[in-house]
Amino acid sequence: MKILIIEDQIDLLHSIQDALSQENFNCETADTKKKAEYKIYTFEYDILIVDINLPDGSGLEIVKQMKRLNSRVGIMIISARNAIDQKIEGLELGADDYITKPFDMAELIARVKSLIRRRLFNGEETVNFGNITINTSKREVYVDEQLVELTKSEYQILLFFFSNPNRVISKETLAEHIWGDHMDISDSYDFIYSHMKNLRKKIVSKNVDDPIKVIYGIGYKFETNR
Amino acid sequence: MKLLTKTNRLSFIWIIPVIIIGSIFCYYMIQYIVYEEADEYLKYEMNRIVAYHNEFEDLPDNHSVVAVIDDKKFDKPHFKDTLILETEDNEMVPYRELYFTIEHKGIHKTILLRHLLVGNDDIFEGTLWIILGLISLITIAFFLMTSYTSQKVWKPFYDTLHKIIHFKTNDPIPVFEKTTIDEFNSLNQTLENLLTKIQNDFQRTKEFNENASHELQTHLSVIRANAELLLHDVDFKNHVTIQKIHQTTLKLSKTQSSLLLLSKIGNQEFSNQDRVNFKESIESSLALFEELIDMREIHVSLSLKDCTTIMDSGLAEIMINNLVKNSVKHNIAKGFITISTNHDKICIENSGTYYTDTPDHLLERFKIGTEGNLGIGLSIVKQICDLYHFKISYRISENNIHQIEIIL
């Protein structure tokens, strides 16, 4: 899986590269529009992560060119501006997703993985860790081959953990993943806590070891034996 | 009051003394002329009689001679006013009399001539008609004149006014009509300078906001990415400290984007004209918070009728989401939310906690809530309401029922 990251802020570029490389993605980088254009015309990529504000032009132009070159590529836009117009324009040009700065790497990874599932596997994929299997097209969860009924948020949380196995996920990251801008983070802790309690109860009720570990004062970690 | 009305009114106040003084002057003028004429006539008559007498030594057979009085002598002709009863009308009629003496065969004979005068009541009546006629003429002429002048002279002013009223900071600076009137030209010039200045300042502030926001969010991303990295580092010991850094950057970026949103609303940067039905917005917003509502066992009752308006659909969504979120967030377990809409009103009621301060303070920016969070959500709602001139009110009844009402 080859990913091109286009971002002018070098520190952030490295952080994204490190985070995605850890997930065994093959990452290449470009910090200007010119370099990015050279790369997209020279090599093939499966996923493009593009910052809109580049020192020598707009990332939206790269999106346009990329779509002309290869329409199967998955494109994710990064922007520091919460401008709705830009988001709509980006999505209209053919981008698949839009993420606003600042974001957590766990969120970015989850989005990239979701994008890969949608773009490259046409949504037909089951992911499994241990005894737990998620069918992402049917949005169904099986624990020890038994169907578990999860609420929308519980499903989202579990899928998020699946995208970020063995990573410490803070409460804030989870809250932002589920509610985005709709909820003030400080108010959502008790909701996160309830969701987590219910989710873990549902998994354990199928006589399976609880894969979710509580990291005191910080958040949670989904542990797999990989 | 309109400029023209005010001008007319002020001018008419000045016309009143003119009319009064004019009428008095007119009355006395007519009276003076009447006397003058009568006296003149009587004097001619007297001269004719004297001339006739000098020539023929006799008095003419003149019907204007009213009486010849024998034993009375005036050294010079004497005028006198008198009233004589006109039997036909049974009315006292004013006359002018002239007494003069001529020497006839050694005897002084005083001759009395008399001439009908115009009565004061007739003069008064005449004056009245003259003045009335004049007033009507003046009024008509005045109105024609002012409306013509206002159309001609004030046209550039109204043109400027119209352009200024409809000016929005995002619009290009209007081109004002060139006129031959110096005052208007300098007004237009000044306005043009001011508008350019305002627009430049506006543009600079807007750019600063966006640049500051862009830089801040980018660097916050780096802080967060590194904090996250440390969270995953098993050898690292101060996870809780890093967690706090991570949490604070998140809060900071949320607050910053809320503040940016507030200033963007204030700057009227959202100018889409979409048809919005709040009934639908409320339904989709409730779906968003459905799980939270279930979790807290909050009972929701709805009475939604179509409630449409023209506004930016993004802002409408933000407004409704903030309202619904507020009613869920500040609710109590097993509480209730009642939402009703009709064609021009949105009313959200929810059970809540005790609040001592004035409810209106809850709509203000940076009102610190009990959990120490910035009460920015409702101030965004208020800002949106202000932008579209919706009337928003916040009430808390005695049994801690919070009610927000928005009248479109």
Image: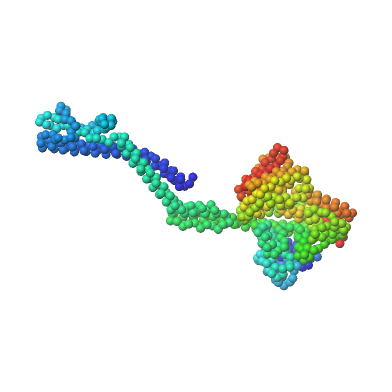
Which residue is located at x 68 percent, y 68 percent? A65
Which residue is located at x 67 percent, y 57 percent? A84
In the image: residue A43, left or right of residue A149: left
- Seen as rendered, the residue at the extreme bottom is A42
Q: Position of residue A196 (x, y in %)?
A: 82, 52
Give the camera-side residue of A183 and A39: A183
B15 relative to A157, above or below: above
Give the camera-side residue of B295 and B59: B59
Which residue is located at x 34 percent, y 39 percent? B128
- Seen as rendered, the residue at the extreme right is A207
Q: Position of residue A170 (x, y in %)?
A: 79, 54
In the image: residue B95, left or right of residue A224: left
B269 relative to A29, above or below: above
Q: Position of residue B9 (x, y in %)?
A: 44, 43
Q: Quadrant of residue B222?
A: bottom right
In the rendered image, is residue B231 in sight? no
